[in-house]
């Protein structure tokens, strides 16, 4: 009488803290599911420069929470009927505005910490 060895399922790990927004941890299949789009759609978005996932040493795409947030923005724009070229331009302008805001904030902080020269 042959008996198969008993296998025990390991308990799921307790949920830990979320990885930093920029840490690329999600495989393309998980990112597609979380973003609510297909894997081929993610590849198409990458081809059009709408998202740039990190790559593992083996070349596997790895998406971060920041990438997922960007994908949500792309999906929202696409649902409004904007084509991929239009989405790319909108994202480019939004990124430029964010960079300018950061520069302005840094300049304001610098000005507030310097002594009056009057």
Image (cartoon, helix red, strand yellow):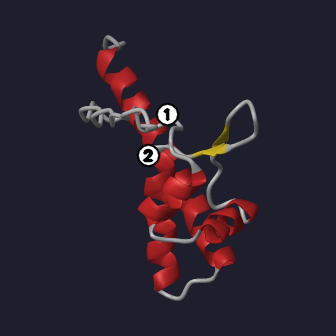
Give residue 29's position: percent from left, percent from top. Answer: 55, 57
Furthest toward the left, the residue is 14
Q: Counting other residues with Cα less than 10 Å from the Cα at mark 1, is it few (<14), some (14-19), or many (20 or more)?
A: some
The reply to whether dot 2 and dot 1 touch (C-beta < 8 Å) is: yes
Give residue 81's position: percent from left, percent from top. Answer: 53, 88
SS for callout 2: helix
Residue 37 position (above or below residue 21): below
Residue nearer the viewer, 54 or 76: 54
| Residue in the image at 31% along x and 14% along y | 116
* Residue 6 falls left or right of residue 67: left
Residue nearer the viewer, 7 or 116: 7
**Residue 83 quadrant:** bottom right
Furthest toward the front, the residue is 1
Question: Where's the C terminus, which quadrant?
Answer: top left
Label 2 vs label 1: CA separation? 7 Å
SS for callout 1: loop
Residue 118 position (above or below residue 46): above
Residue 118 visible:
no
Give residue 34's position: percent from left, percent from top. Answer: 42, 60
**Residue 110 quadrant:** top left
| Residue in the image at 62% along x and 64% along y | 42
Instruction: Please name the residue that numbered disc 1 is placed on.
Output: 23
Residue nearer the viewer, 6 or 106: 6
Residue 65 badge: 2
Question: Where's the N terminus, which quadrant?
Answer: top left
| Residue in the image at 33% along x and 37% along y | 9
Furthest toward the bottom, the residue is 81
């Amino acid at each position: 009488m042959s008996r198969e060895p008993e296998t025990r399922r390991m308990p799921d790990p307790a949920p830990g803290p979320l990885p930093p927004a920029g840490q690329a941890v999600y495989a393309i299949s998980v990112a597609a599911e979380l973003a609510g789009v297909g894997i081929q759609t993610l590849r198409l978005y990458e081809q059009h420069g709408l998202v740039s996932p990190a790559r593992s040493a083996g070349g596997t795409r790895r998406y971060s929470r920041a990438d997922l947030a960007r994908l949500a923005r792309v999906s929202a724009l696409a649902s409004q009927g904007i084509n991929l070229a239009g989405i790319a331009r909108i994202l480019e302008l939004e990124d430029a505005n964010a960079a300018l805001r950061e520069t302005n904030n840094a300049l304001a902080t610098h000005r507030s910490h310097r002594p009056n020269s009057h």
